[in-house]
Amino acid sequence: MTARGEARLWLAQRAAGILLALAVAVHLATILYAVHRGLSAAAILARTRGNAAWLAFYLVFAAAAALHGGIGLRTVIREATAWRDRSLDLATAAFIVLATLAGWRAAAALFA
Amino acid sequence: MNRIDWRARNHPAWWAALVHRVSGILLALFLPAHFWALARAIEGEARLESFLRWTENPLVRLAETVLVILLAAHLAGGLRILALEFLAWRDRQKTAIALSAGASLALGLCYLLNVF
């Protein structure tokens, strides 16, 4: 990848990181709230189903996490192994797309 | 690793970087598993419920607590990196690292106390 491309990945990683800093703080608070209330499928789904605001939050959160995680794994692989050609970039893109779709599927299952 | 190499690494900022990297790798690998588990809700409430009952195993609860600590540590460490890269340099880097570690462990303890 060109130096410009690498710089763009670095910026995308940081932009997603800033968004995730807010989202993860909300997520951690939600986790503590949910486990405090007790985890039962009926109680969780009663709170989540049909909640459009939380659906929107988790659609953005899942995509940002997939992007941040994918670029981060690529960085670690490039630094720790000899794998750094175009196939790594394609594998990174595949991870980001598949993880985003899986996250959206999970968000739809809970909140739609 | 010889003694001098080790001495260069045995430093709070090096440990903070290591924790950030290891927690990042583990969280990225956990992400697909997390999404897969939550998507069980598509198959109905009963399927999600049976998965949630499985997570009541103390070993799973312990693993979840470790994940919460990793997530909190990655958040705190990430804020530290963003501050390093985008804000003016400040002294007291070790204080920032200590606060990050303390906040992450406190959050893990909160989770542990709530979940059992």
Image (cartoon, coloured by chain):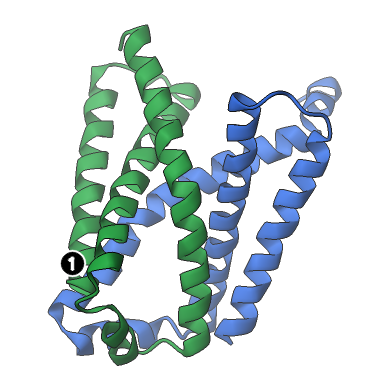
Chain colours: A green, B blue
Q: Quadrant of residue B13?
A: top right
* Label 1 Cα neighbours within 10 Å, binned few <14 / some 14-19 / many ≥20: many
Which image quarter: residue B112? Answer: bottom right
Residue with the mark numbered 1: A108
Given the current orientation, which residue lies at the most extreme left position? B43
Which SS class for mark 1?
helix
Residue A38 % position (x, y):
46, 89
Q: In this view, does A35 lie above or below A80?
A: below
User: Can residue A22 be seen?
Assistant: yes
For the question of whether residue B26 can be seen, the reply is no
Position of B116 compared to B10: left or right? left
**Residue drawn at point x = 65 percent, y = 28 percent:** B84
As rendered, which of B15 and A52 lies closer to the eye?
A52
**Residue appearing at x 57%, y 41% in the figure:** B78
- Label 1 marks a residue whose chain is A
Q: Classify residue B53 by image quadrant.
A: bottom left
Q: Is residue A24 above or below residue B109?
A: above
Q: In this view, does B20 lie to the left or right of A64?
A: right
Residue A55 point in image, percent of width and height: 25, 65
Amino acid at circle 1? Ala
